[in-house]
Amino acid sequence: MKSILNNRPLLAEQINEIAEVAGYLWQKGWAERNGGNITVNITDVIDDEIKSLKPISEVIQIGKPLPHLKGCYFFCKGTNKRMRDLARRPMENGSVIRISDDCAGYVIIADNPVKPTSELPSHLSIHDYQISIGSGYKAVLHTHPIDLIALTHNQAFLEKDKLTYLLWSMIPETRAFCPKGLGIIPYKMPGSIELADATVEMLKEYDVVMWEKHGVCSVSENIMEAFDMVDTLSKSAQIYFTAKSMGFEPKGTSMKDMEELRIAFNLPK
Ligand code: 2HA
Ligand code: ZN
């Protein structure tokens, strides 16, 4: 079958990694029906031949201009497509898009005219911000982890950094591998520009943010790292629930032990 991935091992490697993570999301129970989405900035592995490909869609407006996305290419999960299908057939359940020269819209260029995720305004706003600060972050993951979402149904956990410290204190790895903690964004309409703007603002401080009663959004250099941070936070939530279901409040690592860990691992404050 004719695919943009043919004879392009670097691009194929990126798409395979996305497919692998999509499979994990389904196995975890975090990706019911079309739940969640993934976008990855693949501009680095785009060659001149791809740059000259004709669009296979009309120009679709993003909803806001994003000036740092000029010349960028993204792989995006398709709207209404299932993660479990993306895992097996990524190029039928997602597509490659090219940002228009005015940075206000995009066209689909390969393999099929699969319209990108409904959360594209959030995802592209995040990519625009990451480019503007030169973070090197290329991947944005949105998913619906059962345990982390459940915690946001309790007002007590929505207070700034309450969940961060609770989850960090369950197992040292969470402090080490999610060192900026978990930002909380009060409920907003899925897919809205308001949610996009609030997410970009919160990502100035955190690498993973919770959308109250909806899901998480995680950013990193690559999609595997973005997944790993959410997986680590979810592990901590599981330890918390397991202790609670055994009938006791888990003690948690002390602030003193956590501070020692922070210094030993050279983690941010
Ligand atoms: O794309 O999860 O928030 C499906 C969603 C929207
Ligand atoms: Zn969602």
Image (spheres, rainbow, N blue to C red):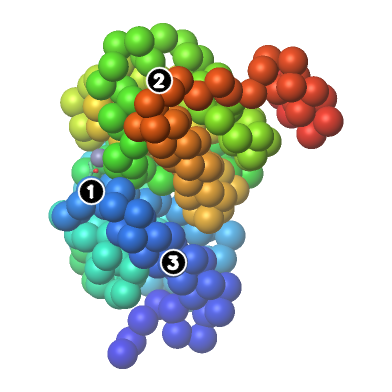
Alpha carbon distance from label 3 to label 1: 16 Å
Q: Quadrant of the C terminus?
A: top right
Question: Does the Cβ of the disc 1 residue fall within 8 Å of ligand 1?
Answer: yes
Check disc 3 and report the residue beneath it: 20
Q: Is residue 237 visible?
A: no
Q: Quadrant of residue 18?
A: bottom left
**In the displayed structure image, the side of residue 181 where residue 39 appears, left or right:** left
Are there few (<14), some (14-19), or many (20+) residues within 10 Å of tag 2?
many
Residue type marked 2: Ile
What element does badge 2 sit on?
A: strand
Q: Quadrant of residue 111?
A: bottom left
Q: Position of residue 256 (x, y in %)?
A: 74, 15
For marks 3 and 2 on the same chain, the one whose residue lies earlier in the sequence: 3
Question: Does the Cβ of the disc 3 residue fall within 8 Å of ligand 1?
Answer: no
Q: Say the numbered circle drawn on residue 35.
A: 1
Rendered position, 110 above or below 58: below
Q: Is residue 167 visible?
A: yes
Residue type marked 3: Glu
Residue type marked 1: Gly
Q: Which residue is the extreme one toward the front?
A: 247
